[in-house]
Amino acid sequence: MEFNYNLPVNILFGCDKINELGRETAKYGKKALIVTGKRSSKESGLLEKSVELLANEGIDGVIFNEVTRNPLVSTVHQGAEIAKKENCDVVVALGGGSIMDAAKAIALIAENGGDAVEYMYGRKSSDKALPLVLVPTTCGTGSEGNCYAVLTDGETGDKKSIRSAAIYGKVSIVDPKLMMTMPKRVRAAVIFDALAHSMEAYVTKKRTPMSDAYAAYAMKLIADNGVPAVEDETGDTVVWEKITLASTLAGMAIGASGCALPHAMEHPASGIKNIVHGEGLAALTPAIVEASWEGDPERYATISVLLGGNSALDCADRVRAFIKRIGLDRGLSELGIEESDIPWMAENAFKVSLGNIENHPVVFDKKALEEIYRKSM
Ligand SMILES: [Zn+2]
């Protein structure tokens, strides 16, 4: 056995840990670019509270609230410009995966300049970025526990991650209470994203003992708490702690192992039609499991059993049943994908995510990918 493992992020986990934001950020800077979205952190009061927590420690906050779903390279460049112009020395992300990923890329470009696309394709790299403080408000991406930043190039539709040790958070403040304000449909999508991360990490060729441990535990937590979290009306702290932990662990798992075919096939779909990442994964994963379980029957059997099944044979059905219970049972066509998009998506998956395609237990060709897209419509 042989593996490398290095996870240089201080994870502060627990209810009300948000109150540490000012003290933690003060270790890294005096002027923070606060990266967030237009609405949710404002409506929940988190933005105002964060500005206050920072101010209490003498930190000025410059708000950049232009980040949208499937964040664009152009938005990253815009944010980096502002960080430079305002002389920000630390970047604070308040939001879900899109926001954290944009913040990570902004921290990289603000420090090094240049075009984020060059970093996406690994043509440029750097070991420096502005220090990052990550505060997730959705429990899906797990970006707080890895060094990935997924961006979309608006010009080509390519959706691809920057992977750089420079963009680990210095600190990630993971507060389960911040997840409780998510609307139901958002909850279902992010929880399925976390399940996909853990399932994919678990079957990848590049899995390690660390990714196995994180992924197996994350899957169990999601299998047991995913439906209660989606249905929760009263702010059940115990459920949200478990589902939030699962999401962070799943993000750490893919950080150690990489993703597999579902992410390789979903990114072209959300790249071309701006669909919700977790919903795209829910549309695609059952057909992918159906086509793949024979490549690693033992692993797919474990996943199936965690989801209430018996063997690898019924794994796809168990995944389908879970998706139905959280209300995400919609095909790609309902999400806005058309039959005519399929050849481009299959082509683009190979262009953008060859690594994840090859990391899957069965390596399919372009024709087979088109077939899976068709079955997922
Ligand atoms: Zn994902």
Image (cartoon, rainbow, N blue to C red):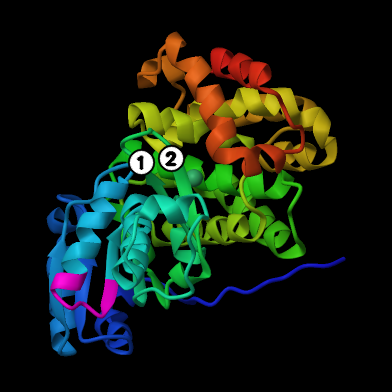
**Residue denoted by label 1:** 153
Dot 1 alpha-carbon crowd within 10 angstroms: few under 14, some 14 to 19, many 20 or more: some
Residue denoted by label 2:
159
Q: Could you tell me residue 228's position as x and y percent?
A: 45, 45
Q: Which residues are magenta?
A: 84-91
Q: Quadrant of residue 287?
A: top right
Mark 1: amino acid: Asp
| Labels 2 & 1 near each other (Cβ < 8 A) | yes
**Residue 352 visible somewhere in the drawing:** yes
Q: Nearer the viewer, residue 71 or 254?
A: 71
Q: Position of residue 88 (x, y in %)?
A: 20, 77
Front label number (2 vs 1) = 1
**Distance (Cα) linking label 2 and label 1:** 6 Å
Helix, strand or loop at label 2? It is strand
Furthest-right residue in this view? 1
The foreground one among 362 and 114 is: 114
**Residue at left offset 34%, top offset 42%:** 70
Q: Is residue 321 visible?
A: no
Which of the pair 350/254 is nearer the observer?
350
Let me know if residue 89 is in the magenta part: yes
Q: Quadrant of the N terminus?
A: bottom right
